[in-house]
């Protein structure tokens, strides 16, 4: 008799069944493992150690329900309610964009350009889950930050994540349409402004898991995907300190055009592309130390 026959399954057999069920996923084995760990409240080592154990019936049913959700293209992060970013755990809901590992290159760019002991003031425009702000406040222990989003539901998630990471006392959150409701800090602007705005062209085809589940307002930005940058770059010069650092994420193929937009707002700034793990230009950084801002 097959070890997978009958209603009972071992942990290992359940993982194999899960991978087959999720064959359409780009990462079926990983997805199955994450979902079973969620059901059992186990880590990888425990899953391996319990490989031959038979799953309790209630755990098997719960696992099958999660597999069905994933098979319908629902992102694993929304199913589990959590996504790791910068080696930190972030709570996510369908009200916020799921953090992507590639966005970590923005955090790396900030660390490469600023003293980690500095008492920076940080502004995250379109804070979403709070992954960028939370990672920066974790990386810069003397920094304080403001997260802005027009979605109250997203702000609630970001606020909760800041508290969970132990940086809540150094973070404030404000409902605003980008920087419209903001004033620059006393004595100058923010030392660091970061944003991962919507940058996908309207009507672009997306993977089902993104198109069906992630918030449209965090994805699309007009016919050329650049509308959010136009709004940001019209306003950021009054919010960024004369010696500040601006970090903007962008989509594949947009970095050169975005750099041209940035230089118009910050003439003479040092402009660099930021590259992700696949060596794609994932963003633009402008170090404004010693430059003039185009107000």
Image (cartoon, grey):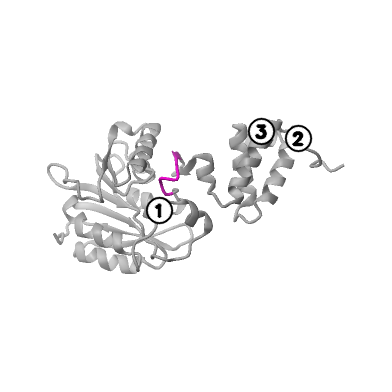
State the image quarter where residue 289 is shown.
bottom left
Q: Which mark is residue 208?
A: none
* Callout 2 touching callout 1 (CB < 8 Å): no
Q: Residue at x 63, y 51 (%)?
A: 28
State the SS at label 1.
helix
Tell which of 264 and 98 is nearer to you.
98
Q: Is residue 249 above or below residue 189?
A: below
Left-right relation of 21 to 279: right
- Return the residue at label 3: 59
For the N terminus, which image quadrant?
top right
- Return the residue at label 1: 105
Residue that protrudes farthest toward the right in the picture = 1
Q: Is residue 8 above or below residue 246?
A: above
Q: Is residue 59 magenta?
A: no
- What's the distance in space between the residues labelled 1 and 3, CA to CA? 38 Å
Q: Nearer the viewer, mark 2 or mark 1?
A: 2
Residue 197 seen in the current view: yes
Expressed as whole percent of the image width and height from the top left, the position of residue 142 reads: 28, 36
State the image quarter where residue 219 is shown.
bottom left
State the SS at label 3.
helix
First-in-chain label (2 vs 1): 2
Mark 2 neighbour density, 10 Å: few (under 14) some (14–19) many (20 or more)? few
Q: Is residue 96 magenta?
A: yes
State the SS at label 2.
loop
- Return the residue at label 2: 52
- What's the distance in space between the residues labelled 3 and 2, CA to CA? 15 Å
Report the span colored magenta. Answer: 89-97
Q: Residue at x 49, y 39 (%)?
A: 81
Mainly helix, strand or loop, the magenta region? loop
Expressed as whole percent of the image width and height from the top left, the position of residue 72 reads: 59, 51
First-in-chain label (3 vs 2): 2
Expressed as whole percent of the image width and height from the top left, the position of residue 291 reads: 17, 59
């Amino acid at each position: 008799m097959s070890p997978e026959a009958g209603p009972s399954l071992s942990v290992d057999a359940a993982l194999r069944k899960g991978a087959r069920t999720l064959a359409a996923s780009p990462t079926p084995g990983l997805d199955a493992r994450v979902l079973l760990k969620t059901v059992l409240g186990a880590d990888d080592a425990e899953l391996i150690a319990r490989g031959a154990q038979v799953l309790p019936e209630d755990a098997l049913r719960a696992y099958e329900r999660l597999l069905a959700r994933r098979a319908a293209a629902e992102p694993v992060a929304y199913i589990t309610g959590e996504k790791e970013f910068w080696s930190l755990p972030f709570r996510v809901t369908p009200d916020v964009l799921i953090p992507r590992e590639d966005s970590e290159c923005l955090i790396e760019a900030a660390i490469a350009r600023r003293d980690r002991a500095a008492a920076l003031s940080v502004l995250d425009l379109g804070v979403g889950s709070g992954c960028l702000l939370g990672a920066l406040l974790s990386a810069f222990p003397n920094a304080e930050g403001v997260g802005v989003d027009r979605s109250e539901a997203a702000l609630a998630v970001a606020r909760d994540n800041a508290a969970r990471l132990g940086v809540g006392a150094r973070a404030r959150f404000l409902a605003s349409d980008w920087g419209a409701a903001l004033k620059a800090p006393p004595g100058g602007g923010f030392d660091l402004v970061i944003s991962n705005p919507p940058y996908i062209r309207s009507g672009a085809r997306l993977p089902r898991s993104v198109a069906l589940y992630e918030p449209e307002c965090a994805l699309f930005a007009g016919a050329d995907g650049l509308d959010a940058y136009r709004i940001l770059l019209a306003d950021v010069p009054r919010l960024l300190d004369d010696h500040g650092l601006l970090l903007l994420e962008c989509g594949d193929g947009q970095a050169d055009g975005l750099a041209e937009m940035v230089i118009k707002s910050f003439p003479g700034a040092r402009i660099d592309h930021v590259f992700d793990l696949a060596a794609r230009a994932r963003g633009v950084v402008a170090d404004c130390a010693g430059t003039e801002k185009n107000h």
